[in-house]
Amino acid sequence: MSATHFILSAICIGFANTCIEWFFIGFLFHKYQALTPQTWRPESNASYMYSTLLSFLFGALFTLFYLKIGWHYVLPGNLWSHLKLGIICFACFSFVSGINNAVYINYDKKFVAGTLIASCLSYLSAAVIVSLFYWK
């Protein structure tokens, strides 16, 4: 993978992650955030900027993960194989910690469902996107 492909992969994953999180967390499930007002910090342009930057960091880190580890476990050109990698990454890195956070933090159950759906779709899209930029 060239440096250009790495950067393009990270940027595309970052944009996809930002859109997915906006749609599921910011649009569909945001109203459930209001049910637990004591849990949330006030929203601002700075918080949106930090969230977007973290999406691009996720893109870079997932691309690095795929480059160093993930490509060993997928079949080249096989979409289902890459989707399975995304599901495994979601289960390992987000599902358990998302549920564990919900046990201790006063989140509404529907908001937790929205964050888990967004996280799962972020990993699935990241796995597919990085596969498009990776050529061995």
Image (cartoon, grey):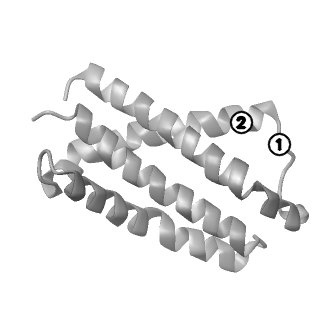
Kind of residue at disc 1: Glu
Q: CA distance from mark 1 to mark 2?
A: 8 Å
**Among the 4 quarters of the image, the one containing residue 104:** bottom right
Mark toward the start of the polypeptide (1 vs 2): 1
The residue depicted at 82 percent of the width and 36 percent of the height is 44
Identify the image quadrant of the N terminus.
top left
The residue depicted at 39 percent of the width and 32 percent of the height is 10
Q: Is residue 97 left or right of residue 91?
A: right
The residue depicted at 40 percent of the width and 36 percent of the height is 60
Q: Nearer the viewer, residue 64 or 45?
A: 45
Q: Which residue is mark 1?
A: 43
**Among the 4 quarters of the image, the one containing residue 43:** top right
Outermost residue toward the bottom? 103
Establish if 69 lies above or below 136.
Answer: below
Q: Is residue 36 visible?
A: no
Which mark, residue 48?
A: 2
